[in-house]
Image (cartoon, rainbow, N blue to C red):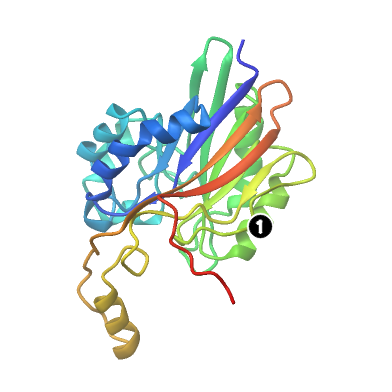
Amino acid sequence: MLTKINLLFIGDIVGEDALPFLKENLDKIKTKYKSNIVVVNGENIKEGKGITETEANFLFNIGVSVITTGNHVWDNWKARPLLSKDSRVIRPLNYPPNNPGFGYTIVDIEPGVNIAIMQLQGRIFMSPIDCPFRTADHFLKSIREKTENIFVDFHAETTSEKIAMGWYLDGRVSAVVGTHTHIQTADAQILPNGTAYLSDVGMTGPYNSVLGMSKDVSIKRMLLQTPQKFELATGDLKISGVHIQIDNLTHQAMSIQPFVYPDFQRVAFV
């Protein structure tokens, strides 16, 4: 039986142009980290807002097991039928009842080895939906009856809410990784009770941009303080992600390693 789970989580994919680039490079990243399971956040794929069955099938065909989403998945009505019928595409668990979709799914990696992928959404500077902390409490008991390997995508705006969730779930899940803000943070760690934590995994898409959006349009929004037509950026594609190794016996994280591919060209400090 597999004793270690090597989970690869790819950060928020922005725009359809990122998909061929991910396809071209995913196998070499999987090989480097000996990945058993690949999870991606896909809430920004379709023209920057949401995901449809076309993009989801593309990802599944290149080896992705689960797609997480977030608040922007609701901006594209074509995402709703997908959320309703495919449990491999999940949305935050703490949206009110009667919204379509699944808040977690369980993946069998091999006989006797499985992992739950769960998503929650924060509330600070976001929609006032149900409490993510209490929602986690409510569902974790039933999830842990099926598997104690649990990965959480916490889709939230502020680092304070994210790290609070990390501490809250420390020892009860294997990993808590933040999404939504598109900038990879430098705080990867394993918390005292064995939960891997990272405030934000970062973005997969055009880095010649402001969070995937055209620089000119974004700067104009800042200068004029009025709405501008959303326009995706192009060029300088990168894949942002994190590798987490989980002990299948203790269900605790053994290591966490964020990455950006290809690496940034860094200017040395003088």
Figure quadrant of the C terminus: bottom right
154 sits left or right of 70 in the view:
right
- Quadrant in the rendering for residue 142: top right
85 sits left or right of 196 in the view:
left
Q: Does residue 98 sit above or below 162 in this rendering?
A: above
Density class for disc 1 (Cα within 10 Å; few <14, some 14-19, many ≥20) is: some
Residue 33 x, y percent position in the rendering = 52, 32
- As helix, strand or loop, the secondary structure at mark 1 comes to helix
Taking depth in this image into account, of 175 and 78 the one nearest to the observer is 175
Taking depth in this image into account, of 141 and 228 the one nearest to the observer is 228
Q: How many marks?
A: 1
153 sits left or right of 54 in the view:
right
Taking depth in this image into account, of 30 and 158 the one nearest to the observer is 30
Residue type pointed to by label 1: Ile
Residue 122 x, y percent position in the rendering = 54, 58
176 sits left or right of 237 in the view:
right
Residue sitting at x 63%, y 23%: 4
Q: Is residue 88 visible?
A: no
Q: Is residue 78 visible?
A: yes
Residue 21 x, y percent position in the rendering = 28, 44
Residue 30 x, y percent position in the rendering = 44, 31
Q: Which residue is mark 1?
A: 163
Figure quadrant of the N terminus: top right
Taking depth in this image into account, of 127 and 269 the one nearest to the observer is 269
Instruction: Please identify the residue farthest to the bottom as the structure is shown.
Output: 224
Residue sitting at x 32%, y 35%: 84
